[in-house]
Image (tube, rainbow, N blue to C red):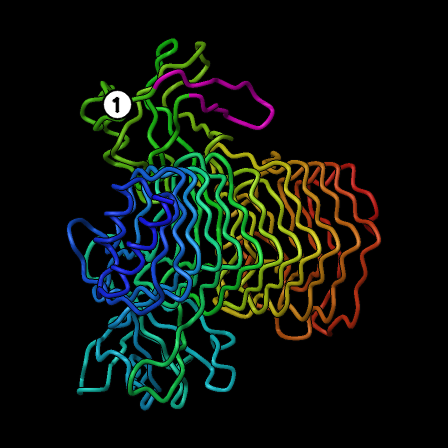
């Protein structure tokens, strides 16, 4: 009875206020475990810290926010969950005013720039991250290249000039354009989940974000996201055109967590970059003496390995378990002058380009490791994720760097479904026990051709070595690709390399190679006229797959390259 009275008191008090945060904090102080925020639109300014709403150290709290819209009035992180366990958030909608992006119509073009007249109701800001949109589909224009390095400036009160050599080859008068990345301060992501365990989102909606929609990093993971939506919001005041964009960056990313999330019955649309990814990195050995090892992560923004985690150099190699850890600055790690010099001189995307933070470890046993070695941790990859029955209509990738289950999803006009560690050629990696089953991948491969990338297929499973080569050693093991439908995809449909124990079964390849294929993958020798292609695979089976309505741009539809052994069913 006392708990019910407290809950009702908080609800009534918050309903009379423009800001629910003070009443929420009061409920926490009173020990309330189920806090109901009354429906309404709450325009929140930042208080102390780098977020609009800080949820730190909560345990076993349920937050009911059905019918609640949080509108951020400053372009920064909306919600921070840190060091929380067993927290449920239900029903909340997140949006921003002003929006973190703008949009308009191309009114003039030049080989070096385009002029964009901004749509009514959208910010008069020269944001420079540009996407060209087909006004008929209201989706990224087919064939749009990477438009990196663009610059923008206001040349009239409602006209932005976007400068980039060759941009007019893609953006023509009458095309729509979105211009994004309007971060003002602090972290740009709408929701950050940091060092948490067992977080549960139900029916949470994100309509816009200066960066990512949801970023989950570090911690035990094991979270769930059910019935959530990351989709464009309603037209702003005074607008006649619907929004073209949801998040400025990725819609949703999980990284460096122990157990991957359950993402089910969710919808993602019109994100500015990747739709969903489960990410991890390797660690460079800087020093090794007996059981004492110094590491640095290639990802400087995450916390890295923890006590109890395992380290490996390869999937079939020995493991070493961490007993203790400590993070120090590079100058405090006792590194040799030779190692320090290599770190200082390291070029971007080289094996020695790592975080300036060092992780001092004590291991259970001594190791064979030496400075310059790369290791990875199977306990910091997000293994065990489930991505099931989701609907994606967004031009970015689904990117997997862990083992888990991807099942029953609709990927409508994505860049691709990619399984790739995306690490330098000498880096340690290993992805095992991956199931990709009963998905529909429709119209992949239409955007941003990348000859320098190995990610050439509507479904690509690749690992790169140096000098435009794919790895000859297996880094993927126990992969099942079953019951999927590849429909009207541009270029190769299925690319598999550097894998062992692979089964490709009961898939349909429909209307493949109907259009001129993109150049993606050509620097790695991946034939753009193939439908299915494999290289450096051992123990790969191809069973009961069908090809329907194969297009005129297909050469030999099934092509097997070098290093494929113990292959079955390929004719």
Residue 428 place in picture, x, y as percent: 48, 32
Instruction: Confirm whether residue 150 shows in the render.
Output: no
The residue at 78%/50% (across/down) is 505
Verify whether residue 320 appears in magenta: yes
Residue 149 place in picture, x, y as percent: 30, 65
Q: Residue furthest left?
A: 48
Q: Quadrant of residue 348?
A: top left
The residue at 18%/25% (across/down) is 331
Q: Looking at this view, is 128 or 361 the one in front? A: 361
Q: Looking at this view, is 457 or 194 the one in front? A: 194
Verify whether residue 414 appears in magenta: no
- Considering only vertical position in the picture, is 216 above or below 548? above
The residue at 62%/63% (across/down) is 410
Q: How many marks?
A: 1
Q: Quadrant of residue 344?
A: top left
The residue at 48%/23% (across/down) is 310
Which residues are drawn in magenta?
A: 308-324
Residue 406 place in picture, x, y as percent: 62, 50
**Position of the N terminus by quadrant:** top left
Q: Which residue is mark 1?
A: 338
Q: Secondary structure at mark 1?
A: helix
Q: Indicate left or right for 325 with 133 as reference.
A: left
Residue 364 place in picture, x, y as percent: 44, 11
Q: Indicate left or right for 64 with 523 as reference.
A: left
């Amino acid at each position: 009875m006392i708990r019910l009275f407290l809950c009702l008191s908080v609800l009534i008090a918050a309903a009379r206020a423009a800001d629910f945060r003070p009443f929420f904090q009061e409920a926490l102080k009173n020990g309330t475990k189920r806090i109901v925020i009354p429906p309404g639109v709450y325009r929140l300014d930042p208080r102390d810290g780098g977020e609009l709403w800080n949820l730190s150290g909560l345990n076993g709290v349920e937050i009911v926010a059905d019918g609640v819209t949080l509108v951020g009035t400053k372009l920064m992180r909306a919600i921070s969950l840190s060091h929380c366990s067993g927290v449920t958030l239900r029903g909340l909608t997140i949006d921003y005013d002003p929006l973190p992006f703008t949009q308009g119509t191309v009114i003039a073009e030049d080989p070096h720039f385009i002029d964009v007249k901004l749509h009514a109701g959208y910010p008069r800001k020269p944001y420079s991250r540009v996407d060209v949109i087909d006004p008929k589909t209201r989706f990224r224009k087919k064939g749009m290249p990477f438009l990196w390095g663009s610059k923008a400036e206001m040349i009239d009160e409602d006209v932005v000039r976007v400068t980039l050599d060759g941009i007019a080859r893609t953006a023509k008068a009458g095309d729509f354009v979105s211009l994004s990345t309007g971060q003002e301060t602090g972290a740009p992501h709408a929701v950050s989940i940091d060092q948490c365990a067992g977080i549960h989102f139900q029916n949470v909606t994100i309509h816009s974000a200066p960066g990512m929609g949801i970023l989950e990093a570090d911690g035990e993971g094991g979270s769930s996201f059910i019935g959530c939506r990351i989709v464009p919001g309603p037209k702003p005041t005074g607008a006649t055109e619907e929004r073209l964009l949801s998040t400025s960056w990725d819609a949703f990313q999980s990284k460096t967590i122990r157990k991957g999330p359950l993402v089910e019955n969710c919808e993602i649309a019109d994100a500015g970059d990747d739709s969903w990814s489960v990410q991890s990195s390797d660690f460079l050995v800087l020093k090794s003496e007996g059981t004492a090892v110094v590491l640095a992560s290639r990802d400087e923004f995450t916390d890295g390995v923890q006590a109890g985690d395992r380290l490996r150099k390869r999937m079939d190699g020995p493991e070493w378990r961490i007993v203790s850890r400590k993070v120090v600055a590079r100058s405090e790690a006792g590194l040799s002058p030779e190692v320090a010099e290599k770190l200082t001189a390291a070029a971007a995307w080289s094996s020695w380009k790592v975080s300036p933070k060092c992780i001092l470890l004590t291991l259970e046993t001594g190791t064979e490791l030496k400075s310059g070695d790369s290791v990875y941790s199977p306990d910091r990859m997000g293994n065990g994720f489930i991505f099931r029955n989701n609907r994606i209509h967004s031009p970015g990738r689904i990117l997997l760097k862990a083992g888990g289950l991807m099942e029953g999803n609709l990927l409508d006009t994505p860049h691709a479904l990619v399984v790739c560690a995306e690490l330098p050629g000498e880096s340690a990696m290993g992805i095992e026990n991956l199931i990709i089953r009963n998905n529909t991948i429709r119209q992949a491969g239409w955007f941003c051709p990348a000859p320098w990338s190995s990610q050439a297929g509507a479904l690509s499973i690749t690992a790169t070595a140096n000098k435009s080569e794919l790895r000859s050693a297996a880094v993927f093991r126990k992969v099942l690709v079953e019951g999927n439908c590849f429909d009207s995809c541009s270029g190769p449909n299925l690319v598999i390399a550097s894998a062992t124990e692979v089964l490709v079964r009961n898939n349909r390849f429909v209307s493949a190679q109907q259009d001129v294929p993109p150049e993606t993958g050509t620097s790695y020798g991946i034939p753009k006229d193939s439908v299915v292609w494999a290289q450096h695979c051992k123990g790969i089976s191809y069973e009961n797959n069908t090809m329907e309505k194969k297009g005129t741009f297909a050469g030999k539809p099934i092509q097997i390259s070098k290093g494929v052994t113990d292959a079955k069913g390929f004719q």
